[in-house]
Amino acid sequence: MLFVPTLDTSKDNNYMRILGINIPDEKRLEIGLTSLYGIGLTRSRNILKEAGIDKDLKAKDLNTEQENAIRKIVETMLVEGSLKRDIASNVKRLKDIKSYRGLRHMRRLPTKGQRTKTNSRTIRGNVRVTMGSGRRKAEKT
C-alpha cells in the first residue's frame, strides 16, 4: 500500500515575516524576534516596548497593525544582511591596514587576547597538533 502524505490546509499559513525571515508562531514575541541576526533579548524587548506590544504575546496572535509596527521599527535598525556586510567590511579593513587584529583574522587565530597554547578550538577548528594527538599505539602480534 502506498502512503501519500496529505497537506494540512486547515492551518492559516500567514507567518509573520520580517526581512525575509519567518518569526516562529508558537514562541513568545520577545524570543521569536531573536531569530533575526543582530537582535538579542534586550533589543527585542526594546522593540516591543517602543511598538507598545505585550512581550508575552505570540506571533500568531498579532494583527497586521501590530506586525507592521514591529516591521517598521526593525527596518530602521542594522540587522541581518546589512549587519553582516558591515562586520565583513570592518574585518576586511583591519586586514587591509595590517593591524594586529587584522593579522589575527588572517591567521584564523583569536583576536581578543585569549590564550592559544590551549583552548582556541573554536576559531581554529578542532585541530590537535600535539605530539601524542595523532599517534596510534602499535598493536602487539
Image: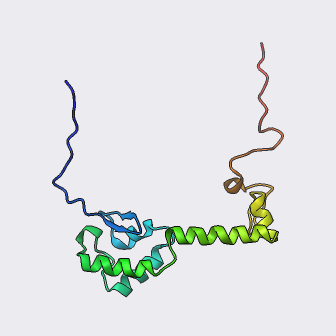
Residue 2, position in %: x, y?
21, 27
**Residue 15 versus residue 109: which sits nearer the camera?**
15
Structure colour scheme: rainbow
Up-down relation of residue 22 to residue 8 (above or below): below
Residue 51 image position (x, y, % from top left): 34, 85
Q: Nearer the viewer, residue 109 or 15?
A: 15
Where does the image place residue 104, in percent across and percent down from the top left?
A: 78, 63
Q: Quadrant of residue 82?
A: bottom right
For the C terminus, the image quarter is: top right
- Residue at image x 80%, y 38%? 132
The answer to which image quadrant residue 135 occupies is top right
Q: Residue at x 31, y 82 (%)?
A: 53
- Pick the residue in front: 98 or 138: 98
Q: How many numbered marks are there?
A: 0
- Name which residue lies at 52% across and 67% down: 81
> Is residue 126 positioned above or below 112 on the image?
above
Q: Is residue 46 above or below residue 125?
A: below
Please tell me whether residue 1 is drawn above or below residue 130 in the rendered image.
above
**Residue at point 19%, 56% (across, down):** 11
The image shows residue 116 at horizontal and vertical percentages of 79, 58
Q: Is residue 139 visible?
A: yes
